Amino acid sequence: MSSQKAERQLKVSVWRGADAGQFETFEVPQHDSQTVLDIVSWIQHNADPTLSYRFACRVGMCGSCAMMVNDEPRWTCRTHVNKVARDGELKIGPLRNLPVVKDLATDMDPFFDKWTAAEAHHHPSADRHDLMAPVDMQSADRVAANTAIECINCAVCYAACDTVAGNPDYLGPAALQRAWTLIKDEKDSGREDILAAISGTGGCHNCHSIGSCTQYCPNELDPLSAIANLKRETVKNWWKRNA
Amino acid sequence: MLDLRLYMLQRITALIMIPLVIGHIATMIYAIQGGLTAAEILGRTQGSVFWFLFYGSFVLAVSVHAAIGVRVVAHEWLGVVGSSLRVLTIVIALGLAALGLQATFAVTLA
């Protein structure tokens, strides 16, 4: 019986090529506790060494291995095959909303360029001669920022976002959520720059609150609320400046 | 495509429309008690600066609000960009305003 169990085969369709390409089908032995990343690695090790994909940590920390699994964005190293395979079949493609370099590897440049465009980087408020800014972990701002800081830049939210799909200039949920954490960070002095950066033509106001970002975030963060908070912050700022 | 200025314009025009829509519906419910004819409507509205301002401001708010909404749809679904998108937004706003104000003027001050 156990040998029969080991011989279970999974029919896996994998994207081959760049933006133009097609799905190629592989038969992969199925095991218990197998992840989607295990499947992709098995194909590269045993069936076709030219298969390109990206991964690093294999434990859900680095954010490198996100792909489309049965047309939904997922971190493949923490996605069990048992939970996603349908009738012994699996479809694995490159992340949506990003250019494909080859096979399952996407060009992440547009994703990270938008982080920069959203001013989603630290703006120092002190230099090395100053004392460390005291941070009250119980303050309302800190509690608000804490809900969003565990982002691993996996781009699952970006691939899930229908607004990004329809509006390529839109900064996307990850960059905007990071901007929100910085606005609430007592050590960051870039508030005005960030608010200006996220109020432009690709800014937070383009979000339709569809909520795919929050639904698919593997770390169970809530970019949808972060973006709603950014909208609120920009509106408050607008009234202050214009009232 | 939708910056803070357009976002605020769309939200503020929505805020303007809320009391006007409620006023319109409340008036309709009140006015149709016992039936309603075109002559009765015109009898109420013609020569009325109040109703001209009431529906005139509604028309202006709708024109701005809807033009920005259609702008988003045109960009995201039809791929309209740049100056074409700007022209489309303005044409829709002016078109809606012209049609609406003409109708408002016809039943109030004409």
Image (spheres, coloured by chain):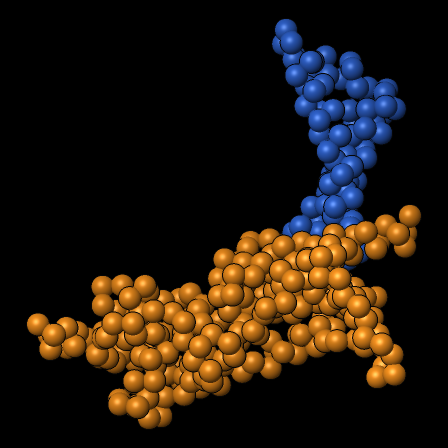
Chain colours: A orange, B blue
**Residue depicted at x 76% and y 17%:** B42
Answer left or right for A208 relative to A44.
right
Q: Is residue A29 left or right of residue B87?
A: left
Vertical arrangement, residue A55 with respect to residue A117, above or below: below
Q: Residue furthest left?
A: A1
Q: Is residue A239 left or right of residue A84?
A: right
Q: Residue at x 67, y 54 (%)?
A: A228
Percent position of residue B43, x then y: 78, 13
Q: In front: A68, or B13?
A: A68
In percent of width and height, residue A26 lies at 25, 80
Q: Which residue is located at x 31 percent, y 69 percent?
A: A81
Q: Quadrant of residue A68?
A: bottom left
Of residues A139 and B6, which is closer to you in this image? A139
Residue A204, can we see it?
no
User: From the viewer's perspective, is residue B11 above or below residue A73?
Assistant: above
Residue for point 42% across, 85% down: A53
In this figure, what is the number of numbered marks? 0
Could you say which quadrant of the image residue A238 lies in? bottom right
Residue nearest the viewer, comparing A82 with A72: A82
In the current view of this chain or complex, which residue is farthest to the top?
B34
Q: Quadrant of the N terminus of chain A?
A: bottom left
Task: Locate residue B13, reporting x and y percent.
Answer: 77, 42
Q: Quadrant of residue A139?
A: bottom right
| Residue A238 visible from this viewpoint | yes
* Depth order, front residue of B10/A216: A216
